[in-house]
Amino acid sequence: MSESSRKILSDNNVSITNPRILVLEALMESQNPQTIDDLQNRLGDRVAKSTLYRVLGDLKKINVLHEFTSPDNTTVVELLLQDSDHHHHLFCSDCGEIIDVGLSNEFEQLLSAEIKKIERKFNFQINDHRVEMFGTCTDQCSNCK
Amino acid sequence: MSESSRKILSDNNVSITNPRILVLEALMESQNPQTIDDLQNRLGDRVAKSTLYRVLGDLKKINVLHEFTSPDNTTVVELLLQDSDHHHHLFCSDCGEIIDVGLSNEFEQLLSAEIKKIERKFNFQINDHRVEMFGTCTDQCSNCK
DNA sequence: ACAATAAATGAGAATAAGTCTCATTTATTT
DNA sequence: AAATAAATGAGACTTATTCTCATTTATTGT
């Protein structure tokens, strides 16, 4: 555990410090998206707020952390160590839950083709994409009864 | 112009007031996504900041305005009067430009099929989706030279 | 292992987006 | 035109994020 957080840092030429290890470990506790608040609560006073934001910035810079905004405008953050972890998100507007979803290869391939068309049309270089789906979890999620 | 903004309001049982007309007209000046700052500058002191936010909330409630967050965390807002205006967004990380893009019917159909699968798998009711693409506009955009 | 140097941290101040309050104005209904 | 209800403006307030700077911690060369 602690090894692999150290490895992430050294592999990316980022100095190994306690706050960075603690934040990485907190992020690894769940592979699902987490709010800053979650993290802060989990870390308590072991990492200062300013340091937490700085470390998250560092992790984004070395490309192991993705950040996005949920429909209720909360910033959400998720470790993404491998390109093969590519996935999308499903948002429940009732309980705020965010679920990781994979889409089929067939779909991803067609999307790649569409993206190539868009690149040509707008003379863009596209390096990432994201599909977001919004709805309500009809009954059985842990938060909505 | 002014007629159609009034029509939008009356069609949705929202009382017709000057700030609402002014905000709608500012939104209609460009069919592209706009930041709150854009709007505020354009409106000057004709609409108070608190009123601007309230009116934008009203327009979201009657479903003629979509709001989202760009990768640099700016809130962006866009009129969407017809379901047939369905489209997606392309973000330039150099200049911040946001471009509306349509994807092919073939793609949208396959995405609908994927969404049905996701609905079943997670017992969700999905009512909206969004494809976001990120990259850089390689040369000719108005902001990047 | 030990200085010297550079980088990262903690604490809290500063900033900025968005919300809230409440007295006044404007729309709507009769 | 009066009465009622709703919307507005102005600015205070809240809260997420960034910034500053003195102190601590990591790294590098010897």
Image (tube, coloured by chain):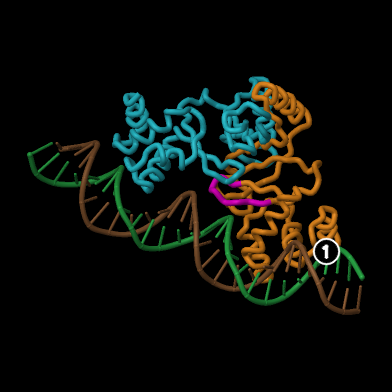
Chain colours: A orange, B cyan, C brown, D green
Residue plotted at (46% across, 28% down): B30
Q: Residue at x 34, y 46 (%)?
A: B48
Q: Which residues are magenta?
A: A69-77
Residue B126 sits in quarter = top right
Circle 1 marks a residue in which chain?
A: A
Q: Is residue B85 magenta?
A: no
Q: Amino acid at mark 1?
A: Ser
Q: SS at mark 1?
A: helix
Image position of A3 (left or right of C14)? right
**Side (left or right) of B52 relative to B15:** right
Residue in view at x 60 percent, y 24 percent? B102
Choose top left, top right, bottom left or bottom right for residue A114.
Answer: top right
* Residue A73: in magenta span: yes
Q: Position of residue A48 (x, y in %)?
A: 64, 67
Structural crowding at the residue carrying mark 1, measured as other residues with C-alpha within 10 Å and reported as few (<14), some (14–19) or many (≥20): few
Residue B133: x and y in percent read 66, 34
**Residue nearest the observer in this picture, C28 or C22:** C22
- Which residue corresponds to mark 1? A2
The mark total stands at 1
Q: Nearer the viewer, residue D23 or A74?
A: D23
Measured as percent of width and height from the top left, residue A21 is found at: 77, 63
Position of A44 relative to A66 (above/below): below
| Residue B13 percent location from the top left of the image | 33, 34
Instruction: Report the quarter where the N terminus of chain A lies.
Output: bottom right
